[in-house]
Image (cartoon, rainbow, N blue to C red):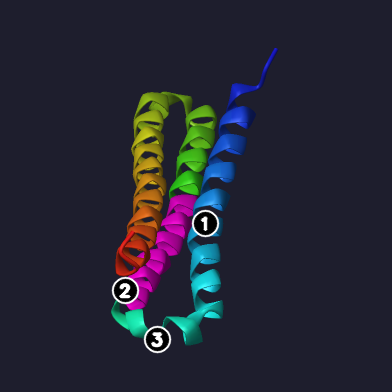
Amino acid sequence: MADYRQISQDYARGAINAAMLVNGGAAVALLSQLSALHDIRLAVESALICWSWGVSFAMFSWVMAFASTRYVDKSVDESARRSQHLTTSNRFMVAGLLLVIGSIVLFIAGCYRVASAFGA
């Protein structure tokens, strides 16, 4: 039988890592080309801000995932408050999902900002 809790944690870890990787990678790639991009300085600055926030969102989503998992564990340890702990866990999970989605949106916004500076 599949361990859905482990599978869920693996997916969450993958999403968080991907969100950090795309935002951080985009920032590094852009910085490596900075001398050639001096004409679009404002676009580069705003893209870097987007990607920095995207990395931050991804890191905060890890904190939400940790808290969510912790409350699932508490629901097992404290069966009298099981429902309350699972509700709290679900709130942290939703917050983490929103942060990962926000990170993806920030990645796209940064890409769009740079692309629009080139007239794409």
Q: Report which residue position mark 2 lands on.
A: 43
Query: SS at mark 3?
Result: helix
Residue found at x 35% / y 38%: 94
**Any magenta on residue 47?**
yes
Mark 1 neighbour density, 10 Å: few (under 14) some (14–19) many (20 or more): some
User: Is 52 in the magenta?
Assistant: yes
Q: Mark 3 — residue?
A: 38
Q: Quadrant of the C terminus?
A: bottom left
7 or 115: which is nearer to us? Answer: 115
**Amino acid on which disc 3 is placed:** His
Compute the Cα span from label 3 to label 1: 23 Å
Front disc: 2 or 1: 2
- Predominant SS of the magenta segment: helix
Label located before the other in sequence (3 or 1)? 1
Quadrant showing the N terminus: top right
Across and down, in percent, residue 47 comes to: 36, 69
Mark 2 packing: few (<14 Cα in 10 Å), some, or many (20+)? many
Numbered circles on residues, count: 3
> Based on the displayed image, in which of its 4 quarters is residue 96 positioned?
top left
